[in-house]
Amino acid sequence: MGVQYDGSGFFGWQSQRHARNVQDVLNHAISRVADEPIFTAVAGRTDAGVHACGQVVHFDSGAVRSLRSWLLGINSNLPEDVAVQWVREVPAEFHARYSAHSRTYRYVLLIREVRAPLERHRAWCRRGALDRDAMAAAATHLLGEHDFSAFRGAGCQARSPVRCLHSLEVTRWHDSLHVVVRANGFLYHMVRNIVGALVRVGAGDEPPDWTAFLLASRDRRLGAPTAPPEGLYLAEVGYPPEFGLPPAVMSWGSPA
């Protein structure tokens, strides 16, 4: 299933006993339709306040329902801040996490001189101009396969800090900047730490090659503060074409 959610009312994806989370809400809705306990596996866990346009989950069930019945039935049991976008049957070897070959995140920076109350849970609202060209130049130093320890959040449980960044773009869209990053996988807080560094460069506090220095240092303590969660969206998860999964449903226009 493709799932979209507004993360501002959740303490992340992961099931937790005493906090509202996306996984428990979704498991409950699917279980109502399947008439049996259902437990979902997810392409990528998101933190508190982080949104998803293209989250992908899978589950196993002995219930026989049409795809339309799954879709409409599950959505009728979900709160307004979560919705299933599509449902497909997949082969038994498919796994939402392990079958994925890439993940794409989008981070939205809103540049305004006054507060934007309607966007406070949708973007990182900042005062002061950011130099998009300097940020784009800084981004080029992070492309390819590297040890991303300098951008790895405390508490990360990944066995290896090595990841491969396929693309990292900074684009302008009206009065916002969008940082779009695609990789084979991400470390804990990696995207938000990259955005924090790019913002330091864009504000003129560091030169564009500072990201190369951070990467070589492998020291998170030398980096910028972690960008806040509200600007981050899991935009899309990439799978081999033989699974035939639909593209993610985006919530904004394409930045110029």
Image (cartoon, grey):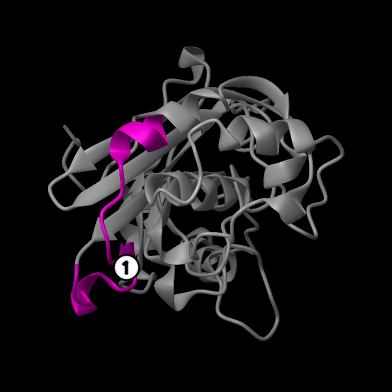
Q: Identify the residue at image location x=38%, y=41%.
A: 179
Q: In front here: 19 or 243?
A: 19
Q: Is residue 42 above or below residue 94?
A: below
- Give the left or right position of residue 108, taking residue 239 as reference: left
Q: Is residue 146 left or right of residue 48?
A: right
- The x and y percentages for residue 245 are 41, 27
Q: Is residue 37 visible?
A: yes
Image coordinates of residue 64 in percent, x first then y, are 49, 45
Q: Over which residues does the magenta segment extend? A: 113-136
Locate the C terminus by quadrant. Answer: top left
Residue 192: x %, y % from top left = 54, 52
Q: Nearer the viewer, residue 243 or 65?
A: 243
Residue at 30% from the left image edge and 38% from the top image edge? 132
Q: Name the image quarter holding residue 99.
A: top right
* Three-letter residue code for mark 1: Ser
Q: Residue furthest top?
A: 242
Q: Residue at x 27, y 61 (%)?
A: 128
Q: Dot 1: what SS?
A: helix
Q: Say left or right for 149 vs 247.
A: right
Q: What residue did someone put label 1 on?
A: 76
In the rendered image, residue 39, in percent from the top left (x then y), is placed at 65, 57
Closer-to-camera residue (159/108): 108
Establish if 168 lies above or below 190.
above
